[in-house]
Amino acid sequence: MLLDEDRLFDKTRALLKEKHRDAWRAFHAPVEDKIGDEEEEEVLAIPTENNPDDDDDGDDDDDDDILNMTCELEPDDVSTDEDTTEKDADEVFEKWMSHKVKFSEYLFDPKQPIKAVGKVNIKEIVAKFDTMNYFRKTGTKDWPTITILARIHFSKMDNSAFQERVFSTAANVMSKVQNRMNFDHLEMRTLLVQNKDLIRKNII
């Protein structure tokens, strides 16, 4: 089996666990109180008696400079236990990986159900199961940090690099000498060339 040979599943699982730790830290991070410019504390000026006989305003200027000075207050040192954070995040992740989703409750078309027991083809689940609907209704409430990962990865823009490679393969198959090739023949040869590695491994 391909997943067993290349350990693709284990690598993907480890990467997803690491990403979930990041999502967990972000979700449970303390909210920092940010003070805007309009909310800055005003410095109360100390009233002083003015001497009418004193024409030197230098002292007043010095007082204004002192009162207008600012200092930055350091926040309290809040220590966080990194090991505990990762343990909590991994515990939620393991529960999610062993969680059994009721696919039949989140279908694109209820008239095309997915059987509740037995083996189910992955392609059938992908075609019928409304993943985004599941995370909107259930995932956000029961698995908030997992939902963050889902929103990040599902919102990524797909690139067309793979399609461009297929077009290049088709262009190489139909050369100038073979420009009158039948379309079905072109499609078959393109698929054979594009999937030659999978054919050699007896995957298809």
Image (spheres, rainbow, N blue to C red):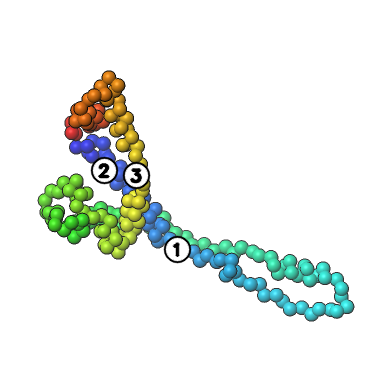
Query: Which callout, 2 or 3, points to the residue nearer the camera?
Result: 3
Above or below, 187 relative to 70: above
Residue 42 image point, x, y percent:
63, 72
Horizontal arrangement in the rendering, residue 152 relative to residue 98 (left or right): right
Residue drawn at x 41%, y 57% is 26
Quarter holding the N terminus is top left
Q: Which mark is residue 30?
A: 1
Q: CA distance from mark 1 to mark 2?
A: 34 Å
Horizontal arrangement in the rendering, residue 44 relative to residue 191 (left or right): right
Residue drawn at x 88%, y 78% is 53
Q: Which mark is residue 142?
A: none
Instruction: Tell me which label, 2 or 3, sits earlier in the chain.
Output: 2
Residue drawn at x 23%, y 39% is 3
Above or below, 123 relative to 170: below
Could you classify mark 2 by the number of other residues whose Cα lies within 10 Å: few (under 14), some (14-19), or many (20 or more)?
few
The amino acid type, in three-letter code, at marker 1 is Pro
Horizontal arrangement in the rendering, residue 78 relative to residue 39 (left or right): left
Q: Quadrant of residue 117?
A: bottom left
Q: Mark 3 touching mark 1, by CB under 8 A? A: no
Above or below, 194 relative to 153: above
Q: Quadrant of residue 91?
A: bottom left
The amino acid type, in three-letter code, at marker 3 is Asp
Quarter holding the C terminus is top left
Query: Which callout, 3 or 1, points to the residue nearer the camera?
Result: 3
Residue 74 image point, x, y percent:
57, 62
Helix, strand or loop for disc 2 = helix
Residue hosting label 2: 9
Residue hosting label 3: 158
Q: CA distance from mark 2 to mark 3?
A: 22 Å
